[in-house]
Image (spheres, coloured by chain):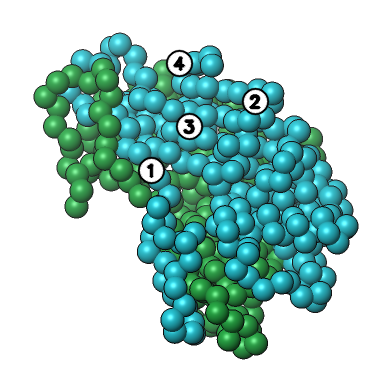
Chain colours: A green, B cyan
Amino acid sequence: MTARKTPRADTRFRRLREKGSKDFDLACSIIDDANMGHVGFVADGLPYVIPMALARDGKHLLLHGSRLSRLMKSLAGGSPCCVTVTHLDGLVLARSAFNSSMNYRTVMVFGSAGAVTDPEEKIRGLDVLTDHLLPGRRADLREPTRKELNATLLVKLPIERFSVKVSEGPPDDPAADLATPIWAGVVPLTLEKGTPVPAPDMKKGIALPPYLRES
Amino acid sequence: MTARKTPRADTRFRRLREKGSKDFDLACSIIDDANMGHVGFVADGLPYVIPMALARDGKHLLLHGSRLSRLMKSLAGGSPCCVTVTHLDGLVLARSAFNSSMNYRTVMVFGSAGAVTDPEEKIRGLDVLTDHLLPGRRADLREPTRKELNATLLVKLPIERFSVKVSEGPPDDPAADLATPIWAGVVPLTLEKGTPVPAPDMKKGIALPPYLRES
């Protein structure tokens, strides 16, 4: 693992490690840690970026949504897209504003998605999306209805053309700044799950399922 | 505040409240809560989505980066962009996969940015970016050098054309599903700051600054 110790300021995120498109496993681990991504597409020459739930199924990203949505139609039709998944892992406080930055992990997946039309593959893909957020949840739910399935588009995007960037570790100040009496370091950031809040209309006596209990 | 109780599945995020472009204050509060956004732009007709630190200065979004980066040159040159800021606030567990979704707050700001060229405005804007992440931090840091300022592009994007979407509250299952013995509710998600980790090369005896202490 090669460390790049020269900060590059172009996004104000440091790029201590910049991984090429061959690091498929790293890309997958970043995707698998995520609940959502930001989907970019072009309409009438203009860029749009929309947050969406996502999951990985082997070598594909899965996205789903209403058959009526412009974005889903665009994705299902194979329009070029860029799906970016980012974890913000920390604020990196250097001795100067210039060298301050963030620790993060991000994957950009480029390409053209396509609709999943095979009924069994579609049902399985939607199950993958459900269980991605909370493994074990799908088994608790009723089966989807035909109407629900018909209203939903599932698309898959191959994880083939992608870029992974990971920035980690402490700030990297030039030697001249190290003597300054300024606190420097990292403030870690993590997305934490809180205590589950039951729906007001939930029947009494339903126990919290195992996948929602603190492990 | 109008509640839309009909879930729209097109992003699998519910849209209980969908705010028009007039809700400037709500857009600002979502931006001010964020450390970063996802910046979409078009190059050679293809979409790109890149995570960037950001801050708000009155009626503008501020972004900064290296003068050499393609993205920053594109933004400074006024190319159309879409900056999307999203907070994922919870997993919404309905009785069916179809009605399960997420609670979130998101703003999409559309338009064309432009470079901040006035030296004083640029220095002030960079200070706003630094203090946005940790109010009070800027005053602790040394002044930026001329070289650092020259290496950095600051751009501002007016918060004029934007779309705000907020989904909150419990799942919204159809009556027919309410009798099922399935746990339903919300798992809250929050981005938490952890204990600050001092840099290994920090001088001894530097106290944790007040803005890093637990309040």
- The three-letter code of the residue at mark 1 reads Leu
- As helix, strand or loop, the secondary structure at mark 2 comes to loop
Q: Position of residue B27 (x, y in %)?
A: 62, 34
- The three-letter code of the residue at mark 4 reads Lys
Q: Nearer the viewer, mark 2 or mark 1?
A: 2
B215 or B106, which is in the foreground? B215
**C-alpha gap between disc 4 and disc 2:** 20 Å
- As helix, strand or loop, the secondary structure at mark 1 comes to strand
Query: Do residues under tags 2 and 1 come within 8 Å of each other at their CB atoms?
Result: no
- Identify the residue position indicated by label 1 in the image: B189
Q: Nearer the viewer, mark 1 or mark 3?
A: 1
Q: Earlier in the sequence, mark 2 or mark 1?
A: 2
- Identify the residue position indicated by label 3 in the image: B13
Q: Position of residue B167 (x, y in %)?
A: 48, 28
- The three-letter code of the residue at mark 2 reads Asp
**C-alpha gap between disc 2 and disc 3:** 20 Å
- Identify the residue position indicated by label 2 in the image: B23
Q: Earlier in the sequence, mark 2 or mark 3?
A: 3
Name the residue located 72 percent from the left edge and 63 percent from the top edge: B65
**C-alpha gap between disc 1 and disc 3:** 14 Å
Query: Do residues under tags 1 and 3 come within 8 Å of each other at their CB atoms?
Result: no
A107 or B124, which is in the foreground? B124
Q: Are marks 1 and 4 on the same chain?
A: yes
